[in-house]
């Protein structure tokens, strides 16, 4: 299990928790349940968590897959620098955000899920992971290679060694006539 | 239209039937809670009661279904039996994982509806207890307080709150555990997590055990209560509802109503599949272990094994476990040997933790457990007259088995084989990792030339990536008799195949035939080939698309 980036799972869990907290909050407010103020909080906290967690971070190893349309939010989240980069901050933030949700039935599920996400983020932080933005690479066009502009200076390269070795039984097939006259390398 | 029906019709029909059953159960159980027997319950809860019960019924149905598509051994057995009657029915069983995911989504949806409805139920039960003394809801909530009757309102006092009640009832507590298990399973099953960190997905998914335990226990508290039939005779809500202040008092004709909870039903739905799945896990465990012989060409490991009673078909795969690396990890590998050989083999490419550990393991530590073989679409190859085999990269491995089997059948046994022509396409970024396969093709080619059967197999190898240094060598060797990369008479082609041209040629040469197209490769290629099959299945020629995936 050495190469797992826990932050990836923490991110999925936190995003789901945000949605659950939001849904519970909406129902609590719309149904005018007792303690609806906590539900209203749930709506606000849910939206905040969703916005924070929607942009997926860049993986340290391997290709990163963006969520659709996450570029704008990536830029926003990146703007907060170390506060959003550091997973200890996220772990404690989610732990703090989830507490008020525990006071009302409609938001209690969101509370527990966000608490679990906080724990996974803590694990990620302990393992030294951090949030890096997925940004499109600014590519410069490659200059056309020198060899295209000028005629080749050297004879054509020989085939890789093992291919040559393979053809021992077919020596004639392995031989080739070099169509370009070979000049000495002192030129 | 015919080509779509041939390829996807049966799947579409299965999904339609499944959705229909879901819709029927929802509506049927919704209506069941609209009858008069539930009048007093609805007096407190309103429509939230049927809105909670209807998805509960759908959840029973879907939780019954969810375990079945992952009983690999059972499916393999079914596939073998059904195959004799209907090839397309057997092919449906290859889409088991897709169905498993669909059922999972449905479970998530119904869970959401169920929970939201119960939020209202809890709130309304609480309100009823907090109500003024002279409302129907309040009176109903007092039934069961020291009068030897069974209660209607599970919230027994006004000095509590819904959250506390949820954590202190069996239904509430099991509900919480089930929902948490479900959410954790879902968040760790997203494509990103599965493809990058399979172990997180695999281990977390075992939370389904907690889910099913919670599911079976969820209803034993009998918290959903309706009027008993006998009470209904004596206290008919249509007549007695208005006189709730006088129930049971002397001189009235309406006694106090009696309530009882419904017995738990879920276990009846899920006990069968749970048992089947338990058998499945036992079967996997019991499969025997065997010492293996190992060969190490380049970064590919070939394991050749012998096991008594092991029977395989072409293109099947096995799951392998090495207890000294990990007790819990089982990994799938395609069998690269043919059924006609006296041993079975797998070729393993070294790409991750487990395969690295396997590569470094000294010979005498080798003890492995094998589970399988399991069927894939490749088994159907010999049922088609004309066959297109497309393998991309490591996806070529199932075809190793098929081609070897072809060699044995035709060349050694001279058996009457239904398949007349095989078009083989191998898309490869580099050939070094698959030297073993190139050797196999060379050997096959030689044999075919000897027996004069060169027309049977048409090999098309496409090298999709190459280095500058190699490119010059290829151009120089263009005229050589044997291909400079593979050593085959059939020349290696560069770049990607033009599928439209290929399909057109095959359609033109084999008018009136059913052509089986078999792919083991990436999703993008699957979409391309699927589309090609549909567009070219016209006027006589039918291209049937079979895709293998793990």
Image (spheres, rainbow, N blue to C red):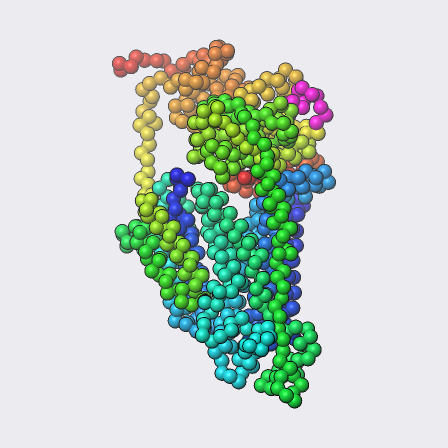
A187, B335: nearer the viewer? B335
Percent coordinates x, y for residue A159 in the rendering:
41, 19
Residue that appears at 60% across and 27% down: B307
Q: Is residue B400 shown above or below B142?
A: above
- For the question of whether residue A181 can be seen, the reply is yes
Q: Position of residue A20 (x, y in %)?
A: 45, 60
Q: Is residue B150 magenta?
A: no
Of residues A153 and B215, the one nearer the viewer is B215
Residue B396 visible here: no
Q: Is B259 rendered above or below residue B209?
A: below
Magenta segment:
B406-417
The mark total stands at: 0
Residue A153 x/y as whole percent = 31, 19
Which residue ends up furthest to the bottom in the rendered image? B251
Q: Nearer the viewer, residue B495 or A35?
A: A35
Residue located 47% across and 69% down the image: B162
* Prevailing secondary structure class for the magenta stretch in the rendered image: helix
Residue B382 position within the rendered picture, expressed as x and y whole percent measured from the top left: 67, 31
Please name the residue shown 61% across and 49% down the image.
B274
Q: Quadrant of residue B424?
A: top right
**Magenta run includes residue B413:** yes
| Depicted B496 relative to depicted A138: above or below | above
Residue A156 sits in quarter: top left
Is B157 on the left or on the right of A146, as rendered?
Answer: right
| Residue in the picture at 33% in, 18% down | A154
Q: Quadrant of the C terminus of chain B?
A: top right
């Amino acid at each position: 299990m050495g190469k797992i980036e826990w932050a990836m799972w923490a991110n999925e869990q936190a995003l789901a928790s945000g949605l659950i907290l939001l849904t519970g909050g909406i129902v609590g407010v719309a149904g005018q349940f007792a303690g609806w103020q906590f539900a209203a909080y749930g709506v606000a906290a849910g939206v905040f968590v969703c916005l924070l967690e929607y942009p997926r971070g860049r993986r340290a190893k391997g290709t990163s897959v963006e969520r659709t349309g996450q570029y704008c939010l990536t830029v926003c989240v990146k703007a907060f620098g170390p506060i959003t980069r550091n997973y200890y901050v996220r772990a404690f933030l989610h732990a703090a955000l989830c507490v008020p949700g525990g006071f009302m039935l409609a938001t209690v599920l969101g509370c527990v899920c966000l608490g679990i996400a906080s724990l996974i983020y803590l694990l990620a932080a302990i393992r030294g992971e951090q949030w890096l933005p997925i940004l499109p690479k600014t590519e410069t066009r490659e200059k056309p290679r020198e060899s295209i502009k000028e005629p080749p200076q050297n004879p054509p390269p020989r085939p890789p060694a093992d291919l040559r070795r393979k053809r021992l039984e077919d020596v004639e097939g392995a031989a080739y006539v070099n169509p370009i006259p070979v000049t000495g390398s002192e030129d | 239209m015919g080509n779509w029906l041939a390829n996807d019709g049966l799947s579409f029909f299965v999904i339609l039937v499944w959705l229909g059953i879901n819709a029927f159960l929802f509506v049927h159980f919704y209506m069941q809670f609209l009858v008069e027997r539930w009048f007093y319950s609805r007096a407190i809860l309103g429509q939230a009661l049927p809105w909670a019960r209807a998805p509960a019924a759908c959840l029973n149905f879907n939780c019954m279904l969810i375990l079945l598509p992952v009983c690999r051994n059972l499916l393999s057995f079914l596939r073998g039996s059904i195959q004799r009657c209907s090839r397309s029915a057997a092919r449906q069983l290859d889409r088991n994982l897709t169905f498993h995911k669909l059922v999972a989504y449905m479970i998530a949806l119904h869970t959401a509806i169920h929970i939201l409805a119960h939020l209202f139920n809890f709130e309304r039960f609480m309100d009823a207890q907090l109500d003024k003394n002279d409302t129907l809801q309040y009176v109903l909530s007092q039934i069961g307080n020291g009068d030897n009757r069974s209660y209607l309102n599970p919230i027994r006092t006004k000095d509590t709150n819904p959250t506390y009640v949820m954590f202190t009832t069996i239904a509430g507590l099991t509900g919480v555990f089930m929902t948490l298990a479900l959410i954790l399973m879902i968040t760790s099953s997203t494509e990103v997590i599965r493809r990058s960190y399979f172990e997180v997905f695999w281990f977390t998914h075992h939370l389904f055990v907690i889910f099913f335990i919670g599911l079976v226990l969820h209803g034993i508290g009998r918290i959903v209560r309706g009027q008993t039939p006998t009470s209904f005779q004596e206290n008919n809500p249509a007549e007695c509802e208005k006189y709730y202040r006088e129930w049971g008092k002397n001189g009235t004709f309406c006694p106090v109503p009696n309530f009882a909870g419904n017995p738990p039903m879920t276990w009846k739905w899920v006990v069968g599949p749970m048992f089947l799945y338990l058998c499945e896990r036992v079967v996997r465990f019991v499969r025997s272990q065997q010492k293996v012989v190992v060969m190490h060409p380049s970064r590919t490991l070939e394991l050749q094994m012998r096991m008594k009673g092991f029977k395989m078909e072409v293109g099947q795969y096995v799951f392998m476990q090495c207890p000294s690396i990990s007790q819990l990890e089982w990994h799938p590998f395609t069998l690269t040997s043919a059924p006609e050989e006296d041993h079975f083999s797998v070729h393993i490419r070294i790409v991750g933790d487990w395969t690295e550990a396997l590569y470094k393991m000294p010979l005498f530590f080798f003890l492995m457990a094998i589970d399988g073989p399991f069927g894939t679409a490749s088994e159907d190859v010999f049922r088609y007259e004309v066959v297109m085999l497309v393998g991309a990269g490591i996806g070529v491995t199932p075809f190793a088995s098929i081609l070897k089997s072809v060699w044995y059948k035709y060349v050694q046994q001279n058996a009457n084989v239904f398949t007349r022509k095989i078009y083989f396409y191998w898309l490869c970024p580099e050939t070094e990792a698959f030297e073993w396969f190139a050797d196999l093709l060379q050997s096959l080619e030689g044999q075919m030339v000897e027996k004069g059967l060169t027309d049977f197999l048409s090999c098309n190898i496409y090298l999709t990536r190459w280095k500058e240094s190699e490119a010059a060598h290829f151009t120089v060797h263009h005229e050589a008799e044997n291909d400079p990369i593979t050593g085959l008479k059939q020349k290696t082609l560069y770049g990607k195949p033009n599928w439209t041209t290929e399909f057109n040629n095959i359609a033109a040469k084999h008018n009136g035939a059913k052509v089986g197209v078999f792919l083991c490769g990436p999703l993008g290629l699957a979409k391309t080939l699927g589309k090609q099959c549909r567009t070219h299945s016209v006027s006589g020629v039918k291209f049937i698309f079979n895709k293998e995936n793990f």
